[in-house]
Image (cartoon, rainbow, N blue to C red):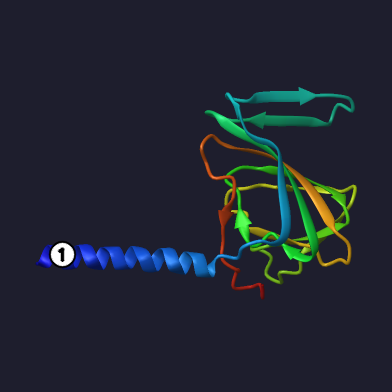
Amino acid sequence: MKRKWVWALSAAVIGVAVWVGTVLATPQSGVTTTFLANKVGFGEIDVMRHTIPADWQARIKTKGLSDGYVVDNVIKPGGTTGWHSHPGPSLIFVVRGEVTNYESDDPSCTGQVYSAGSGFVDAGGDDVHSLRNNGTVDAETIAVQILPSGAPRRIEADVPANCSS
């Protein structure tokens, strides 16, 4: 009989944890996502390039297999990606409108605005962020992501304590 109670209690705890995670997560709204390249496999990457001018250089190095994605997000006015992170880096190109990138580690949670023709790097890992279209026209971003093979592309997160939404 004691064993049944332990199993029942374990099942209840797991159920509550799943429910709380679903309730506290901040899902995206007003966002249409199109995969231009979906989970393309790469072997280990080890690229280092120097070019002219001589002080410019690039380095990409992975250990183990990687998955690559190219993701097109159209965000309606007032739309948001919700709070989330990625297990690897992303290059974000703003191709239409403007987006505000809110970072969970920004004490004031003021956000950085990026307009069409600009871009930024999402470092991934512990970098929890949310993009929002605070404008009056659709915004569009294209993200190029390199992630550990088999890892989830997106990890949902709660609203940080220093941000209102």
Left or right of 55 in this view: 7: left
Left or right of 23 in this view: 130: right
Looking at the image, which residue is at 62% across and 48% down? Answer: 124
Looking at the image, which residue is at 13% across and 62% down? Answer: 3
Q: Residue furthest left?
A: 1
Q: Where is residue 73? Give x, y as percent.
A: 75, 50
Q: Quadrant of residue 45?
A: top right
Q: Residue furthest bottom?
A: 164
Give the quadrant of the C terminus. Answer: bottom right
Left or right of 151 in this view: 52: right
Secondary structure of residue under mark 1 = helix
- Residue 118's place in the image compared with 104, above or below, is above
Q: Quadrant of residue 112?
A: bottom right
* Residue identifier under label 1: 4
Count the marks: how many? 1
* Mark 1 surroundings within 10 Å by alpha-carbon count, few (fewer than 14), some (14 through 19), many (20 or more): few
Q: Where is residue 9? Give x, y as percent.
A: 24, 68
Nearest the viewer among 95 and 104 is 95
- Residue 149's place in the image compared with 2, above or below, is above
Q: Where is residue 88? Give x, y as percent.
A: 61, 42
Q: Quadrant of residue 55?
A: top right
Nearest the viewer among 44 and 98 is 98
Left or right of 128 in this view: 75: right
Looking at the image, which residue is at 66% across and 47% down? Answer: 123
Q: Where is residue 13? Give x, y as percent.
A: 32, 67
- Please name the amino acid that badge 1 sits on: Lys
Give the quadrant of the N terminus. Answer: bottom left
Nearest the viewer among 56 and 12 is 12
